[in-house]
Amino acid sequence: MTDNPDSPYTPEELVRQDGVGAPDPFMRLWTPHRMAYIEGENKPTSSEAGAGCPFCRLPGLPDADALIVHRGEAAYAVLNLYPYNPGHLMVVPYRHVADYTELTDAEVADVSTLTRQAMQAIRTVSGAQGFNIGMNQGEIAGAGIAAHLHQHVVPRWAGDTNFMPAIAHTKVLPQLLPDTRALLAKSWP
């Protein structure tokens, strides 16, 4: 199943699963928790503020349960349940607002400050060498929860697109989210 002579797997060790279709080079690590995201579980059914919006609901929970790393005056930092990389978090205003242009000056300042602090905490914990920072404004732009603005802070390292995603078509996150939250919260500037 692999033509790579450096692969730790020999074809005899790989088992083809009956019914998956044409053989391909993908190794499959089962991550059933991702189905909740794919199927839209817990995704708001309306654009209204309140308990139906996870970003409105999270601040009412204990930090460890909500995976909140730090609370500011107008916004908070929370780990992403479906991270692209270890330490991927989001900065979210408390107020239910969809568009960046609708933020108050105080909210813009707090989102900016928390983003800068998140970068510092992530660097302290993991030595991140770079970051992708951004907002998907609107569902058409890829926002999973378009009704409540959130800014992604995704740490990056040289080689973080290593053999797993490039060759094995797999992404590995080496740490449980509660452990990541505890480290970042402890290291928050």
Image (cartoon, rainbow, N blue to C red):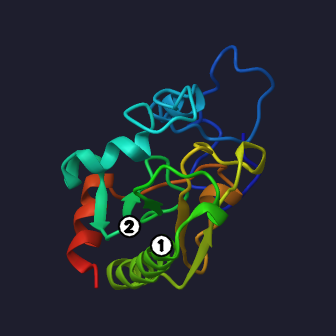
Find residue 112 and report its horizontal and vertical position in percent: 50, 79
Residue 175 pos. (x, y %)? 34, 58
- Left or right: 9 with respect to 23? left
Q: Name the residue under label 2.
A: 74
Residue 72's label in the rendered image is: none
Tag 1 secondary structure: helix
Q: Quadrant of the C terminus?
A: bottom left
Is 114 positioned to the left or the right of 125 in the image?
right
Residue found at x 61% / y 35%:
12
- The x, y position of residue 179, in whole percent, is 25, 59
Which one is in front, 103 or 127?
103
Mark number, residue 111: 1
Does label 2 or label 1 sit earlier along the sequence? 2
Q: Residue 184 appears in which quarter of the rendering?
A: bottom left
Q: Which amino acid does label 1 sit on?
A: Val
Q: Position of residue 123 (x, y in %)?
A: 41, 83
Residue located at (32% from left, 46% from top): 58
Query: Label 2 neighbourhood size at 10 Å, few (<14), some (14-19), many (20+)?
Result: some
Residue at image x 38%, y 67%? 74
- Quarter of the image holding residue 76? bottom left
CB contact under 8 Å: marks 2 and 1: yes
Q: Which residue is drawn at 65% across and 48% down?
A: 143
**Marks 2 and 1, how far apart in space?**
8 Å
